[in-house]
Amino acid sequence: MKPKTKREIWVYIDLRNERLFGLSLNVLARAYELNRSVSGTIIAIVIGSLTNSATETTTETPAIPANEAADRCLSHGANRVFIFENPNLTVPRTDIYASVVSDAVESRTPLLVLFPLTEFGRDLASRTARLSNAGLIADCVDLTMKNGRIVASCPSWGGEILANITYREDFHKTGFATVQPQGIQPVNSSGNPGTTERIPVERVAIPEGIELISSTYEREERKKLEEAEIVVAGGAGLATADAFGMVRDLAAALGGEVGATRPPVLQHWIKEDRLIGQTGKTIHPKILISVGTSGAIQYTAGITDSKTIVAINRDPKAPIFQIADIGITTDASTFLPVFTSKVRQTAMRSLTDTLYERKGADEEKISGFGEKLLKLRESHGWSRESLAQATGQSPEFIKQFEKNEISPSVSFLLRLSRAFNVDPGTFLHESEKAMIRDQRAQQFVKRTENYSYKTLTPGTENEHLRSFMITIESKQAHKPVAYKHEGEEYIYVMEGDLELTLGGKVHKLKQHESIHFNSETPHKLKSLSDKATRCLVVLYTP
Ligand SMILES: Cc1cc2nc3c(=O)[nH]c(=O)nc-3n(C[C@H](O)[C@H](O)[C@H](O)COP(=O)(O)OP(=O)(O)OC[C@H]3O[C@@H](n4cnc5c(N)ncnc54)[C@H](O)[C@@H]3O)c2cc1C
């Protein structure tokens, strides 16, 4: 039986931003290839309004104006362009657009309608096919003509196999398909004659029960993910939105971008524009750290151009290890915090080294400290104001640093280290460390004038965490009378009775009792027993 359809291949063109428009041109290229065997007409389907929105609700027009899109489609493979117009079509909605496409399909009966395989394209294709009561071939990577029938190659069984699918022989209606837009470049057909038709849509069926309140076109960001040198990608193995935050933390510490497999996108842990793979973005970073991803072919399709792939997965048999350069078999939730902390420490160390290199060399030379700080701040997604607030400085002060106009003081470095949540010691040059050690040593001498003091961790008297035993003679007070210092203190009474006056409050501790307190609060100790009181003290000073 002769087909009842016209020899037309339609391609839906997404105008929402340059990236999506580019994907539509790729599908147009796929149609162009197929048309070599079909010898029909390729028609680009543009939906929208040439005029600005008549509704009060839309504040911006699409990123690609319909007129411009039409011209570009004609020079990239389309023979004709249909612009379906109605003021109610300015805001792309699959529920509304589906009825426009299916009405047009009913009146013109094209052979095939292709949609780019994006979330929107997939949704629109399935709704339209349903309204047209027609067959939809999903996710095809190639389209060919065999024995007069269209055959689509589609990944099946989770990408394990490529299945060839066609429309039934007794099916003489329009066929629908979503097409993988990666792996093909737009064709250049400039100079070919082509026409654009503006088709007013008389009636737009607005679904009942839903009212659009407002809508704005999201500005497309710079191609951050595609251009990034470092990408940290998270997968379903992260298990929760909170845990996915660890991927963000690591990316920030490395100054990289965050990507994801499909499950985190579906779970709304991250936006769709961060999806990597067959239906997402193709990346080519110097380093990709792929965390909790199994290595499904649809994902790895987007990462094979990465120079070095580091895979973190708790399953040693995960397929991702087959393409990884470095594989780490571990639980992401325990590994990531430690790894991120090390990375931060290294970043801070490098910042400090830059500073001291400059001090040792030509003072006038641009040090690079400012640039590094700027990069670090931006990678953490902090505004200048938020870093200023976290370090107790003014935004102007931070700006001067970033321009290398002033040299940072030790106290600023210490505050920075706290803001970035790293060990302050990282920031200190040996001379400053020595200075602080000296100060601590002097305090140590002063402290021990009044009681015998024996450290349990020799050599760590000047470190952040120290433990020691103190002995306070019977019925004697611990002198100096009141003592306070930054940090925390823990006291365990080993022998005797202790009286601890903490701020205004008196605590009486017997043998084997302990107390943990903020040592900024003035505190003094006294032995209440007839014998000497011996205590174990652990001090933490930041
Ligand atoms: C047509 C089509 C197109 C598709 N397009 C894409 C696409 O573009 N991009 C994409 O990503 N997917 C795509 N998919 C989905 C794809 O097939 C996979 O389902 C998806 O990539 C799997 O994501 P995942 O690796 O994060 O999850 P899973 O496959 O579930 O893997 C999770 C991994 O985490 C590991 N894990 C679990 N807990 C931990 C832990 N605590 N620590 C460390 N590791 C842990 C597990 O061992 C497992 O290997 C597509 C599918 C189809 C059919």
Image: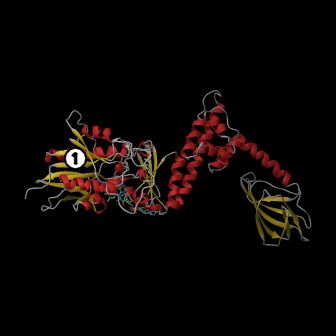
The residue at 29%/43% (across/down) is: 25
* Location of mark 1 (residue): 31
Q: Nearer the viewer, residue 193 or 33?
A: 193
**Secondary structure type for disc 1:** helix
What colouring does the structure picture have? Answer: secondary structure
Asked where in the image residue 22 lies, by quadrant, the reply is top left
How many discs mark residues in the rendered view? 1
- Residue 140, how many percent across, how many down? 25, 55
The residue at 15%/49% (across/down) is: 7
Q: Amino acid at mark 1?
A: Ala
| Figure quadrant of the N terminus | bottom left
Image position of 422 with respect to 352: above or below: below
Q: Nearer the viewer, residue 323 or 420?
A: 420
Q: Nearer the viewer, residue 482 or 360?
A: 482
- Residue 321, how many percent across, how many down? 39, 56
On the rendered structure, is 181 left or right of 479? left
Taking the image as drawn, is residue 219 in sight? yes
Taking the image as drawn, is residue 297 in sight? no
- Residue 24, how many percent across, how many down? 30, 46
On the rendered structure, is 347 left or right of 44? right
Asked where in the image residue 392 lies, by quadrant, the reply is top right
Image position of 358 with respect to 108: above or below: above
The residue at 29%/38% (across/down) is: 72
On the rendered structure, is 164 left or right of 3? right
Q: Nearer the viewer, residue 246 or 188?
A: 188
The residue at 62%/48% (across/down) is: 420
- Residue 337, how many percent across, how many down? 56, 56
